[in-house]
Amino acid sequence: MLRRPGFNLHLRPVEALPQFDAARQAAVLQLLDDGSAPVRQALLAYLTAVGSPAEPFLRHIASGTDRPLAGHAAWYLQELKFNDPVAEFRGFIRSLNYELETGALLLARTVAPRLDIGACCAELDAIAARCRELIAEPSSRREKCRLLNRVLFHEWGFRGDQEHYNDPRNSLLDQVLSRRKGIPISLSIVYLLVAERLDLDLQPVALPGHFLVACFAEGAPFFIDPFDQGLFRSREEVLALLRSNQIEPQAGDLARTPVREVLCRSCRNLVKHYGEAGDTVRARLFASFIEEFDAAYAR
């Protein structure tokens, strides 16, 4: 327990912590400028247990006019390693240094700031490790993709979410990994990230109204539909799919899609799905990311 005259703050296990309400914020404020090591260590442990609700409170103080107190708040923010996921994703967009796994995880963190990136990567590693157990070299890329299909869609149970297609969680990598269902683009991202771990040269292909994974490196190109349990399609079958949806194929429809456009398309989906869910704040947030992508590309 931290104690100062007229003030008590009990430290409890995180699962038993009460709401970080105004009274507890006032209590923390009284201790914030105490420089003694025992108080700092105890207060740091308490704020760690409080977790994300402590972040806006500390940021408000850190930006205030009481500069000595702001300095103490900044110290706790640094020690707690709180950061701004939205600013971090904007920085990624502006960097023009686009890598699919990093971008997909940073995008997901804008919705779930406490997302465990290590756990997401470990899940992808585990899927790839299981594929390696099954691959007998020499194997063609098509044979390796068949094994990837077996692991991803049968052993791990990933599937297209046809029942709740517009659920925003279907576009967020961490949620797709934990729920094992998604939409064409998010399942394609999972497929590509596992393939990358297997040194399997596959590419994203953003069709009008659908999303596929393609292999261009071996003879005639073939296409994989992760939303349809990894169904293989030939070039002619993909063109026929577009025509069946009253879409006249264009020359670039079957070309590799840049990572920038993959992530931007994910943002467009989230604008639509959050808008339909009535979450206008997040819809506007992802619309602003699209504007950032467009501005960065224009530069």
Image (cartoon, grey):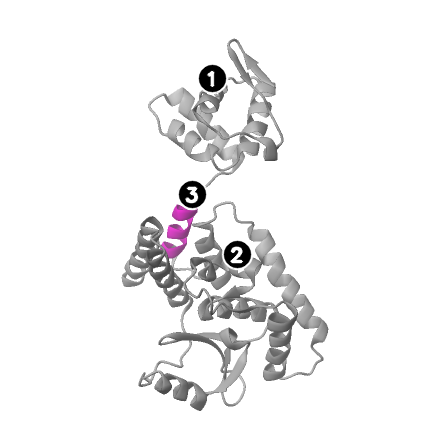
**According to the image, label 1 marks what residue?**
30
Secondary structure of the residue carrying numbered label 1: helix
**According to the image, label 3 marks what residue?**
84
In the foreground, 253 or 24 = 24
57 relative to 120 in the view: left or right:
left
- What segment carries the magenta color? 84-94
Is the residue under label 1 in contact with that under label 2 (CB below 8 Å)? no
Secondary structure of the residue carrying numbered label 3: loop
Give amino acid for label 1. Gln
Give amino acid for label 2. Asp
**According to the image, label 2 marks what residue?**
174
Compute the Cα span from label 2 to label 1. Answer: 38 Å
From this viewpoint, which residue is outermost toward the top? 5
Q: Is residue 153 above or below residue 171?
A: below
Compute the Cα span from label 3 to label 1. Answer: 26 Å
The quadrant the N terminus occupies is: top right
Count neighbours of disc 1 (C-alpha within 10 A) and say few if under 14, some if 14 to 19, many if 20 or more. few
Label located before the other in sequence (3 or 1): 1
The quadrant the C terminus occupies is: bottom left
Q: Is residue 249 above or below residue 99?
A: below
Give amino acid for label 3. Asp
Residue 182 visible in the shown view: yes
Label located before the other in sequence (2 or 1): 1
Point out residue 38 in the picture as x, y percentages from the top left corner. Answer: 61, 19
Point out residue 218 in the picture as x, y percentages from the top left corner. Answer: 54, 86
Point out residue 258 in the picture as x, y percentages from the top left corner. Answer: 40, 70
> Can residue 31 be found in the magenta stretch?
no
The residue drawn where x is 40% and y is 25% is: 70
Compute the Cα span from label 3 to label 2. Answer: 18 Å
Tell me the mark number nearer the camera, choosing from 3 and 2.
2
